[in-house]
Amino acid sequence: MVAEMRMIGWMCGFTRLDGIRNGVIRSLAEVAPIEEKLRETRLRWFGHVKRRKRGRPSAEMRDDRPPPVEREGGVDRKRV
């Protein structure tokens, strides 16, 4: 995010020494807030995984829950 803001500020003719807030620079450059971009990317990835066929490991992990781990009887040992 820092590199992105540096590039956007540089495009607008500002440096970090000018002390202009990120929100102001983003509004001048008409760039979407980073939260929206992250959400968009996450949803795009989820749609990609959702479209996969049933046999793929990622599709199986999405639909199934791992079986519970069965422990052997006994007392837990202390860990140091």
Image: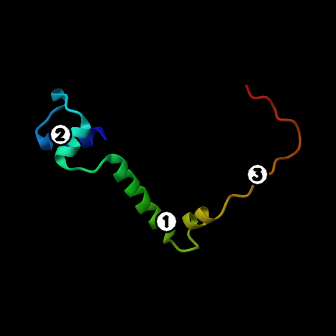
Residue 9 can be seen in this image? yes
Q: Nearer the viewer, residue 29 or 60?
A: 29
Between 16 and 24, the one nearer to me in the picture: 24
Q: Is residue 7 visible?
A: no
Q: Residue at x 38, y 51 (%)?
A: 38
Specify which label sits upstream in the sequence, 2 or 1. Answer: 2
| Callout 3–callout 1 Cβ contact below 8 Å | no
Judge from the rendering whether residue 62 lies leftward or rightward of residue 80; answer left or right: left
10 Å neighbourhood of mark 1: few (<14), some, or many (≥20)?
some
Residue 73 place in picture, x, y as percent: 88, 44
Q: Which of pointers 3 and 1 lies earlier in the amino acid sequence?
A: 1
Check disc 2 and give the amino acid type: Gly
Kind of residue at badge 1: Val
Based on the displayed image, in which of its 4 quarters is residue 27 positioned? top left
- Local packing at callout 3 (Cα closer than 10 Å; few below 14, some 14-19, many 20+) is few
Up-down relation of residue 37 to residue 50 (above or below): above
Whether residue 53 sits left or right of residue 27 in the image: it is: right
Residue at the disc numbered 1: 49
State which mark lies toward you, 2 or 1.
2
Label 2 CA crowd tier, 10 Å (few <14, some 14–19, many 20+): many
The CA span between labels 3 and 2 is 52 Å
- The answer to whether mark 3 and mark 2 are in CB contact below 8 A is no
Residue topped by disc 2: 9
Q: Which residue is mark 3?
A: 69
Q: What residue do we see at 60% from left, 62% from top?
A: 61
Circle 2 SS class: helix
